[in-house]
Image (cartoon, rainbow, N blue to C red):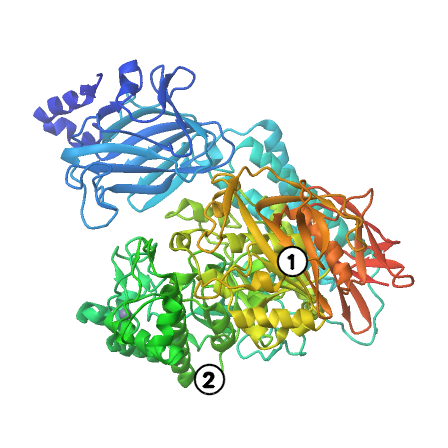
Amino acid sequence: MRQRTYKSLRIVFWFGLSCIWLWAGSKSQAGQTLLLDDFETLDSVKRWEGDIQLSKGRSSHGQYSAMVRLEQGRSQISSNKLPQDWRGYDRLLFDIYCDREEVSAITIRIYDVVGGDFGIAKANDYYEAHEKVVVQKGWNHIEVNLRPLRAASGGRDLSLDRIRRLLISAARAPLPWTIYLDNIRLVAGQEGRQTASRTQPQDTRTIVDNGWFTVRQVARPEEVPESLVVTAFRKEAQQEFDRLRETVRAAQLQGIETIYQERYLVTAELGLQIRPRLAWFNNDEKKREMFSYIVESCRRGRLELEDKIQGIDRMPEADDTQVGDPLIRPFPPLKGRPVKDSFFLDERNEPMMILSLHSPSQTLQRFFATPLQHIESYTVGGGSRWTIYDSPVYAAFQRWPDTHRVGWDGWCGHLIRDINSMGGRKRENIVICLESPHTRQAIEEYIQTNIPKFHANPELLYDIEAYELMYICYCERSQQMFHEWLEKKHGTVINANEKWGTAYKSFSEVVPPPVSDSRPLPETNRALWYDWARFNQDRFTDYLLWVRSLIHKIDPKTPLAAGGSSSMLAGRTGTTGIDEERIVNEVDDVILHEGGESTLGLDLQIALAEKKKPVADPEMYLSSVDNLIPHFLHGKSVAQLFHWPAQPSSEVHSINDSSLAHSWAYPLADIGDLIRAALDLRRLNKEIAAFVDVPAEVAILYSQTSTLQLPPEMLTWQTTPYLAELEKTYNASQYLDAKITFVTERQILKGWLSRYKLLLVPAVRNTPTEVFEKIWDYAVHGGRVLVVPESFLGDEYNRATDHASRLGLIIRQTQRPKPGGVGAMVQGYDQSLSQSVAFVDDTPQKLSPTRTEVFGSIDQLETRGIRQIFEAKSDAKILFRYSDGGPAIVQMAVGQGAIYYSGSSLEERRYGRLLEDLFREARVTRPVRLRIIGGGDAWNIEARFAPLGNRKLLYLVNYNSTPKRVSVDAGPGFFSSLLDLRDHHDVQGAEITLPAHQTAIYEMF
Ligand SMILES: [Zn+2]
């Protein structure tokens, strides 16, 4: 072992003390270093656990470093054989070299004797810099402040005299990943040259100070060397920026609209002034990309304006006695906007598209609505993780034990904070019970104090009681409420016993099934659990209504909302207490949806509503900018983008991923596109609204029962077999040129199926018998239904049903892919009701058509996932066969309609092919069809038609990463040319090239 203590400076220092008058001014110059590991000998790597070896390729000190390979399941290294007395040093330093282009983050943990070593220490009883160490290409020099080194719990400082282990982990970075680690040392005062690492001005330097970190470079940004070529680009970019700015001013003098060209000024300032000051942008490659975009975009903007100034680009003819409207009208004050159907209305009663930025920037409000558009009032819990300490709820929580949550060990659901919650002053568990009268009284007080203040906001469009919620409590009061709920639902305990398979003598004996690790125990009675989960949803919805009523007493006008939307598309919904359908219909004036990825969740959220309401996204995180307009075309009309903060985050590295200003994920061109999209949404408000108003003729069954009636282990899964099939069905039907929606079990019971021409049933394993009867009835009266496995096996209490035999089917065997085959979600099919199960390799199987009239043009289908071997009754028409000749997809005539039954889950794209023919057979209205020029299906291209008065509109979204050339087909005389409403160019004929990731909106003439 080689552990050197560098004492040279120290000796000089002590010598100096003897003649103190000489040294008085330079004490702080003295430094001391303790080397923990410099990876110069083979002995060195033996001290470490993990995949680590000596490497000569890279080093920041000495000749060698440690090459560390991190991979899935082995994503950390650590050592407990380093020097353990860290007293007297004020920082831990080390270096990491990385080859990867993208910015990643790693986590450091330090264990001490007091908390115990890795594996022994209690959660958070060690130091943790969780993803606070930013690592990018090249050398990264990391500095961790040791004075003090606070435990992650916040409860104590680590004992620096008895450090146990240093651990470096990359669990959430993309893996596998190879990094080089070198020169781990402790330093007091200024470090001597002998021990310091070699550095270059452009190297990254991350300084971690307990909960906070900052990233910079070794030199100040302007002192980092820049190549002559990049400097030349910088000058040219600056010149083009200046010229555009002057041209904008001149155009404005003339009353020429400049707002679209002004977006290039924003991207230019970002690219010239903001991003080059950030460590992850200040390199030649990134700067060259930014500066050349600025040159090109500013020039383009200037030329556009010059053409307007000269009259080369003629303005539309207008009444010359009137001054016209601006192209983008300013937003009226948002408070009190009237609502009609799906939209807030402006002062002309036109539907508004309200897009704001979560940002303190006033400049950006030129393009976006005010971020004051909504508030989260935190009235559900009476405070947030930041404000709770000033709330009466905190006082009640301290004083009354019955305000504490009982029986739940998972996430607090924003009610209100647990030890892992971000933000706020302290790390503390404040997890509340909502049934305690003390909690209720405190919340009422909180509402009375705060709502008048919050609602005085003159731009307040709507108030969110709270969102991303979840709640479950097992306290005495909860149990009592559950007993009353059961009595109301079942009448007698005999009825309930029959459903549960139990022998309770009275409801008061019933104990709610407990949870551990956020899910019910393995042997839980699933019938009873179902009632408990339903009860929990009902009581939480009732609670949200109670909060709503308190706010309404103070302000009956401001629209309210609440929810936890994402949970309905995950396994956990049964423990969340979130009944999104009741919330949408009973609590919400405005429907909440969070997310900027697939439109599935948004369409589902809208489908839950029995009455049209505006849909708002309070925290829209754009996984990519091109998803923004599609969300508005699907019905979102209020959104606040998360986010454009003043500074990069110093607390959580991954938050910078979503910062539009700072993220490496959004090139300047994307920011330009984003501002253009924001302006287009405002300018094309009526046209976009027209697409939202088109009714859907195809519905996918959203079975809330199938999300709640699950084997216990699935409650902590990201998705379930039902949800995976639901998603597949949505994707398969998305690119067939017709709007699709969802229909819920409650809606089916209300007779809503008659609105649709086709119902798709995706692995709806459990549904109440009454729902099945309604579906049957729908077919009898002419409806068409497609059923894929496993559907209709059990009711809501997971009792076997004989619906398959009603359909004329005998299921002989169910074949499931072996675990590991198709990913975790299908590994655990619920076997409780299937008779004969065989596990097979997930080799896709081909289905051969029997050349029927409807599906005659399909050559072949392919299965993916579960398969059933079944017999159908003799009058069923076999449409496709398995390779052994057995029926695979059959059609059964039911009354005037038909039920199509597929014995297998289909591969997504082939599934789309089958649906194409089913849509045609069901006569789904599709006045406009898309065709790929050169053949093939229009996969990943969404097309929808909408009328607007006597105008004909069409939008196309190309989700592909390559441009596509398509032909727009319609009946004779339907149209002869297209006008692109976004960029105002004419298309003669019907052929269009769609750029990758772009949305185009056309008017058809
Ligand atoms: Zn409780």
Residue that badge 1 annotates: 630
Please state the horizontal and vertical placement of residue 366, each as a whole percent of the image. Answer: 60, 62
Which SS class for mark 2? loop
- The residue sitting at 37% across, 64% down in the picture is 529
Q: Where does the C terminus fall, quadrant-wise?
A: bottom right
Q: Which picture quadrant has residue 199?
A: top left
The front one of 564 and 657 is: 564
Q: Residue at x 48, y 39 (%)?
A: 820
- Residue 679 x/y as whole percent: 66, 61
Q: CA distance from mark 2 to mark 1?
A: 33 Å
> Residue 184 appears in which quarter of the rendering?
top left
Residue 722, position as x, y percentages in the image = 52, 55
Q: Nearer the viewer, residue 347 or 702?
A: 702
Q: Residue at x 10, y 28 (%)?
A: 20
Q: Quadrant of residue 391?
A: bottom left
Left or right of 2 on screen, residue 1000: right
Nearer to us in this view, 748 or 299: 748
Q: Amino acid at mark 2?
A: Pro
